[in-house]
Amino acid sequence: MTPRFEESFKDLKVTVLAGGVGGAKLLVGLDKTLNPGKLNAIVNTGDDFFHFGLHIAPDIDSVCYALAGLSDPIHGWGRKDESWQVLEELRRIGAPDWFALGDKDLAWQLERQRLLNAGMSLTEVTEHFCATFGIPSRVLPMCDEPAPTRIRTQNGEWLGFQDYFVRQKCKPEVAEISLTGGKKIAPSQAAERALREADLVIFAPSNPWVSIDPILSLKGVREILNEKVVVAVSPIIQNSALKGPAAKMFRELGIMPSSEAVREHYIDLLDGFVFDDLDQEDSKKWQASDIISESFQTIMKDEKDKVALSEAVISLGARILVEK
Amino acid sequence: MTPRFEESFKDLKVTVLAGGVGGAKLLVGLDKTLNPGKLNAIVNTGDDFFHFGLHIAPDIDSVCYALAGLSDPIHGWGRKDESWQVLEELRRIGAPDWFALGDKDLAWQLERQRLLNAGMSLTEVTEHFCATFGIPSRVLPMCDEPAPTRIRTQNGEWLGFQDYFVRQKCKPEVAEISLTGGKKIAPSQAAERALREADLVIFAPSNPWVSIDPILSLKGVREILNEKVVVAVSPIIQNSALKGPAAKMFRELGIMPSSEAVREHYIDLLDGFVFDDLDQEDSKKWQASDIISESFQTIMKDEKDKVALSEAVISLGARILVEK
């Protein structure tokens, strides 16, 4: 059994690997749970793409907006209280409108591009955004270079991630996933430092294939993680994903989607694993493993849920840290 | 005396050199006066600049919006029925807000950048915009390469044009003007063709220094114009400009701003010159010249004024054409 959450856990240095929406939810809970300055989020940039000449970073923005309390609670992406004047005009003039950039959101994309053009790195721009938003936790792009995820579909076509994910609504069947543009890329210095200095590393309940794997594929990341206590939270509940194509991807890649399959996916790296209470019955049939697996309510409907899950994950990590 | 405007004049091929707001007004009149396909506008791109990584082309947009009937009648620039959601967010996050891009306007800037990135030339993008807007006349950027106008101020600093014009509101005293980035640049093929094929060339009532001179400074343009009937419309009325810094520039460059000074500025190129009725008394003191100068109401408050001035300018040009 996981111990009760203790006050001293708030001073653990926690580094989270995260994608967008699911990751952002847990990060909000962790941000509220840990003492200021203890949380680092290393965020996938494999989803980043250029749209209208602007560097769009969907996962970084989802995380920043969530931590700033500015997320749209209905869509799960973008800003709350958003307006759509630019998108409507784009539609009127026959410009591409498949990627829904709201007006407030767009202002950030413009400012990001301006700062990048002025010579700032993506890490520095993101730091500037966090300061502007008043976010005490650090949001770190996994790397500063372009590291695009691409999807090969069953008909042999390679698609950019947003093309697959947004424009084609994840409909094409996935045959293969190419990470970081097929090149071996180093994590940013800040991301590497956040990993090295972490007491505890958490894999957020994000898509293993296209949110967490891009970070894991960076040069040296697995080696650092081998020395760390790592706890993953399953994004799969009862064989499906709350949001996004994770379960569909497992299936198309020939694997039955389940919490056990998620655990298996990360098997070399994990010390602890948190899966949903709804999979508790199922978990009795899982293969034996050294990984300490515990169930909890992983569906985060409100802030209370986010904090409760955060406390549970940190507590499990703390227990493993003590035992190690 | 200028002959009455004749029906046959509507088939003259007219090419106009123009800047933004003042040029756009006359172009609207000419567009309504001439038969479809007879009007070509060669528009200054010396004001173009990169803002948030987007190629902004203020004069081209002023002309296109005016010809499409989409101009803001109050500001004289930008779109009517405009909203400012993005600009307000830029302001909130401390991003540069000195260049007022409305939401609708911004959609066009985004789409332009997308098409440029896809390999279209500025000429092709502008043609696409005209088609989208349903503009029958041709709007031609003076060239496809960057050709920035720069202003040296009295304290020796070089400013980009929009920095001088918008951010610093034309306040710095002008010491020197550098055109087309200090390089010899060729006009676009389409602009050169429009000049060669013109029956009549008109210099719109735009700023001679920073709207018309950039076009005149392009390789071979003066040589072509030497073979053409050229009529200029003065942007100066009673020693001042209706809008913008033209009169101030004349003064700072040591020249008393007047219609005569405008005629003098273009002296090598002109066959005809139209100045405002309000300067008629003054014109009696002008130096003698071969240029046929006639006064008319050049202030264009409404469409009637625009068409009337257009007919007058074309009629003067037609008379010179017959006499030549």
Image (cartoon, coloured by chain):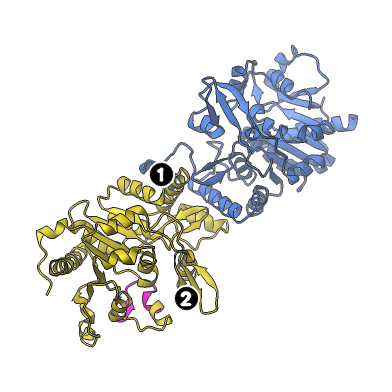
Chain colours: A blue, B yellow
Judge whether residue A93 can be spotted in this image.
Answer: yes
Measured along the vertical axis of the image, is residue A108 above or below residue B210?
above
Report the residue at 40% width, 59% height from top. Answer: B186
Measured along the vertical axis of the image, is residue B250 above or below residue A232?
below
Residue A232: x and y, percent? 74, 29
Residue type pointed to by label 2:
Glu
Residue pointed to by mark 1 = A90
Say which chain tag 2 marks: B
Residue B312: x and y, percent? 17, 68
Please identify the quarter of the rendering in which residue A278 is found. top right
Q: Quadrant of the N terminus of chain B?
A: bottom left
Question: Looking at this rendering, what residue extends furthest in the top direction?
Answer: A285
Report the residue at 73% width, 35% height from top. Answer: A310
Please identify the quarter of the rendering in which residue B290 is found. bottom left
Q: Is residue B121 left or right of residue A160?
A: left
Residue pointed to by mark 2 = B176
SS assignment at label 1? helix
The range drawn in magenta is B237-248
Q: Nearer the viewer, residue B198 or B65?
A: B198
Q: Nearer the viewer, mark 2 or mark 1?
A: 2
**Residue B113, disc:** none
